[in-house]
């Protein structure tokens, strides 16, 4: 177990292509860190630099207080699981897992110790009955467990995983994700995990590093920080499924009160979001108004601050509907409606062409500047056109509580 520290780590390929931009991150002992982002954002390249499989172009990498820039992968005390299983087809499962132990020379392991470590890892992963089989006789999930077992048996300080579940089907991926959570509790070491799947990132990581194409770090924080307080429009749209609705509109300031005007309606901001806007003295400006699909509610009778939308597509997901709707001014939104509280009559109306009324509260709103695409309510430290910082965003505490009467009627903008 060890701390990992990356300071101004950079990767530039021949021809001047920059894969990773001044990457800064402190990983605590036994912490589970997830690098997430779209393909080509530099997350796997960063992981391979930690492993020593890629040379770094600048900066330093420290493992357990030791700078490892010039150390070979075998001397860094790391174990790595790759996207492809990379198993030896002519060896049994037992021999595949034991392979790194047999290569160990200082100190050389006895056969009894090798047997004990392999069987112990196999028991943890639930593959004891497959130890005598060859890889071709295993399913994809079983092969991935063998690859994880081969990494587990080594004495390592850092456990690296490069998209280990991307080749599995949905059912196996969900199963293996749960097993990785249990594995983390059992071996209790420092993990660095790379994925493009934001569901894996949210369920596995103690902290998440969200990266953007070009090797930029857009935000570092806990899963709840990235979901509830995204630092930028990019993070807001990347984290969450379906992605956050974004609507171009204006933030309106009237004394201590704030309003937004999406779809031609003037809606009040209230609660904590209003307090933060006032404490930061945010000026009126054009914004992207963000609202997550799960925070939009169905209004059975048109009243209060609600507005009509027309259903274009209804995706039946079992426990909920994903409704693709369009507003009166042509804005397209996605709404998640749980099915459990819907009557049979209401379910029959959830079809293309039907008009329903929806609403969302002020506390569900997110405000991003149209000029910078940064969140107006937190410290915007992740600048895509400048050197990104590595500190987690921290929302400011409101200096005073703002009281406002709740409006029961929407005000149509003239």
Image (tube, helix red, strand yellow):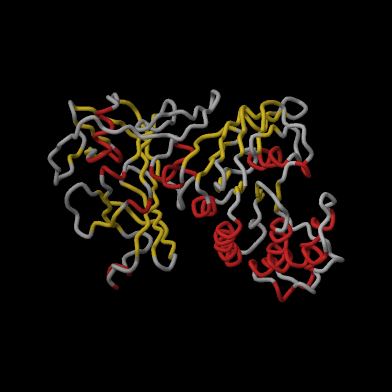
The answer to whether residue 36 shows anywhere in this view is no
Residue at x 65% of width, y 52% of height: 163
The percent coordinates of residue 7 (x first, y second) are: 61, 29
Whether residue 236 is visible to the viewer of this picture, yes or no, is: yes
Residue most toward the right? 90
Q: Is residue 388 left or right of residue 346?
A: right
194 relative position to 275: left or right: right
Residue at 14% across, 43% down? 407
Q: Position of residue 85 (x, y in %)?
A: 74, 58
Q: Is residue 287 left or right of residue 90?
A: left
| Residue 26 placement (x, y as % from top left) | 56, 36
Which quadrant does the C terminus fall into? top left
Farthest residue to the bottom: give it: 129
184, 175: nearer the viewer: 184
Q: How many marks?
A: 0
Q: Position of residue 176 (x, y in %)?
A: 60, 63
Q: Is residue 234 left or right of residue 15?
A: left
Task: Please determine whether, in this image, residue 69 is positioned above or below residue 78.
Answer: above
The relative height of residue 380 versus residue 101 in the rendered view (above or below) is above
Q: Could you say which quadrant of the image residue 41 lies in?
A: top right
Quadrant housing residue 250? top left
Tell me what residue is drawn at x 61 percent, y 35 percent.
5
């Amino acid at each position: 177990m060890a701390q990992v520290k990356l300071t101004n780590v950079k990767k530039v390929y021949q021809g001047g292509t920059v894969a990773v931009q001044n990457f800064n991150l402190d990983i605590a002992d036994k912490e589970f860190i997830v690098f997430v982002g779209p393909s080509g954002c530099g997350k796997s390249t960063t992981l391979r630099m930690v492993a020593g499989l890629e040379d770094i172009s600048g900066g330093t990498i420290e493992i357990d207080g030791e700078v490892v820039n010039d150390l070979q992968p075998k001397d860094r005390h790391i174990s790595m699981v790759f996207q492809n299983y990379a198993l030896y087809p002519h060896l049994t499962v037992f021999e595949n897992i034991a392979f790194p132990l047999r290569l160990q020379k200082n100190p050389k392991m006895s056969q009894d110790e090798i047997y004990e470590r392999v069987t112990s890892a196999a028991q943890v992963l639930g593959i004891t009955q497959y130890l005598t089989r060859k890889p071709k006789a295993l399913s994809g999930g079983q092969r991935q467990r063998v690859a994880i077992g081969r990494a587990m048996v080594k004495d390592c300080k850092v456990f690296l995983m490069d998209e280990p579940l991307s080749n599995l089907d949905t059912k196996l991926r969900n199963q293996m994700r749960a097993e990785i959570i249990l594995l983390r509790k059992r071996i209790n070491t420092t993990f660095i995990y790379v994925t493009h799947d934001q569901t894996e990132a949210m369920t596995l990581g103690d902290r998440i590093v969200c990266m953007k194409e070009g090797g930029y770090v857009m935000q570092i924080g806990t899963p709840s920080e990235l979901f509830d307080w995204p630092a930028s429009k990019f993070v807001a749209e990347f984290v969450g499924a379906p992605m956050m609705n974004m609507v171009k509109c204006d933030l309106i300031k009237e004394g201590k009160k704030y309003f937004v005007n999406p779809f031609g309606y003037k809606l009040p901001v209230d609660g904590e979001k209003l307090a933060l806007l006032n404490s930061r003295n945010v000026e009126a400006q054009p914004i992207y108004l963000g609202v997550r699909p799960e925070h939009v509610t169905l209004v059975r009778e048109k009243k209060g601050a609600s507005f009509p939308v027309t259903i274009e597509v209804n995706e039946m997901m079992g426990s909920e509907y994903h409704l693709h709707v369009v507003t009166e001014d042509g804005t397209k939104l996605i709404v998640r409606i749980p099915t459990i509280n819907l009557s049979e009559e209401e379910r029959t109306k959830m079809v293309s062409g039907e008009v329903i009324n929806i609403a969302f509260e002020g506390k569900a709103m997110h405000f991003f500047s149209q000029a910078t695409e940064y969140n107006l309510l937190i410290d915007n430290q992740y600048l895509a056109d400048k050197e990104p910082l590595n500190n987690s965003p921290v929302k400011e505490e409101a200096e005073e509580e703002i009281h406002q009467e709740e409006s029961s009627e929407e005000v149509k903008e003239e």
